[in-house]
Image: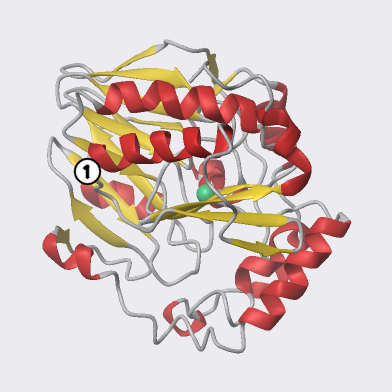
Amino acid sequence: MMRPVILSLFALLTLSTRAFCTVTDTSWCNHQLRPELKNLHEVKTSHPWYKVYDVGHHTYAIVEPYNWEETICYLIIGSNKALLFDTGMGMDHVLPVIKELTHLPIWVLNSHTHPDHIGGNYEFSHIMAMNTAYTHHSAANGYSHQQVRDEVTPGSICLSRLPGFDTAHYYIHPFTVTRYINNGYIINLGNRQLKVIRTPGHTPDAICLYDEQARYLWTGDSFYHGPIFLFDEATNLHDYGTSIALIARYACNATWVLPAHNLPMVKPTELIAAANAYTQIVTGNKKVSAADGDVLTYDFGQFSFKIGKQYLNQLKGLKGKM
Ligand SMILES: [Zn+2]
């Protein structure tokens, strides 16, 4: 998920929408935790910005529930190393949280390199990344304060949860990639292996992970509960269609889907429903539910797709390929 970071006309429209929305968006300090989180086993750490949940199979979901993004990172622990899948918003240090959960060597990998997923990358020394031009650019540049300042407005974050946080200078650090990987790469954590599945669409470097033994499927921003954002300049609606169809096939065998926003454990049937829903958009069988400037919402209840009107032509030729 990410607001547009390049100041196009579209971005300005979105920013003005955001300003309007803050009127009703009282405060993230009054925001109630999602009730589903109460059903999960919480693990207390000494870092209250994060909520940590044990989601089974030696895996922790590290949630940032006090910012509108509600980003989720995952610490996936093997017998001789651990993978941190995403590093969050970079508003509070994430490395000390990880150190309370494991003493194993940590490798970082990002579901994609939007700023809400790479904020803590600079804290780590072992980072693997997809070998795409988009990833190279994100690693080399990070995101400037101007690009991410909207994340820290009073309507976007509960600042009293983060004493001393300097919103005026918040930015996303660049980071150094130590190993480039490609589609199908197997991450070997010792007693468990994770398969990297290239799923471009939300961004060109978007990936999912599959643990065949645990039957866990991590979906990044390709699927989660809530509005799925497909209006960034880096989005490709054609690629997204083939990617969500691909991961829906993995979901047929999965026990849980673990997305990068909102809720850490989602039933695989919901991802399959989302893939079917996207097919309805592709075939023209789903009408637009709402329009906000150039962003069209196709609402399906638990999830919706927010699609950039100007990219709809990318759907041509996708019919029958999903
Ligand atoms: Zn995101």
Task: Please name whichever residue, 243 or 297, is drawn nearer the observer in this view of the structure.
Answer: 297
Task: Please name whichever residue, 36 or 117, is drawn nearer the observer in this view of the structure.
Answer: 36
**Is disc 1 surrounded by few (<14), some (14 to 19) or many (20+) residues within 10 Å?**
few
Q: Which residue is drawn at 20% across and 28% down?
A: 254
x and y, in percent, of residue 188 in the image: 29, 15
Q: Which residue is drawn at 56% across and 43% down?
A: 122
**Residue 118 visible in the snapshot:** yes
x and y, in percent, of residue 31 in the image: 39, 81
Image quarter of residue 169? bottom right
**Residue 126 visible in the snapshot:** no
**Residue at mark 1: C-beta within 8 A of ligand 1:** no
Disc 1 residue type? Lys
In the picture, measured across the screen, residue 238 lies left or right of residue 260, that is right
- Does residue 235 sit above or below 162 in this rendering? above
Task: Please name whichever residue, 243 or 93, is drawn nearer the observer in this view of the structure.
Answer: 243
Q: Mark 1 points at which residue?
A: 267
- Does residue 261 sit above or below 183 in this rendering? below
In the picture, measured across the screen, residue 212 lies left or right of residue 137, that is left
Task: Please name whichever residue, 251 or 300, is drawn nearer the observer in this view of the structure.
Answer: 300
**SS of the residue under disc 1:** loop
x and y, in percent, of residue 292 in the image: 69, 65
In the image as oriented, which residue stretches furthest toward the front? 285
Q: Residue at x 88, y 58 (%)?
A: 9
Image quarter of residue 176? top right
What is the count of numbered marks?
1
Colour mode of the rendering: secondary structure
In the picture, measured across the screen, residue 315 lies left or right of residue 37, that is right
x and y, in percent, of residue 17 in the image: 71, 73
- Does residue 232 sit above or below 299 in this rendering? above
Q: Residue at x 15, y 17 (%)?
A: 191
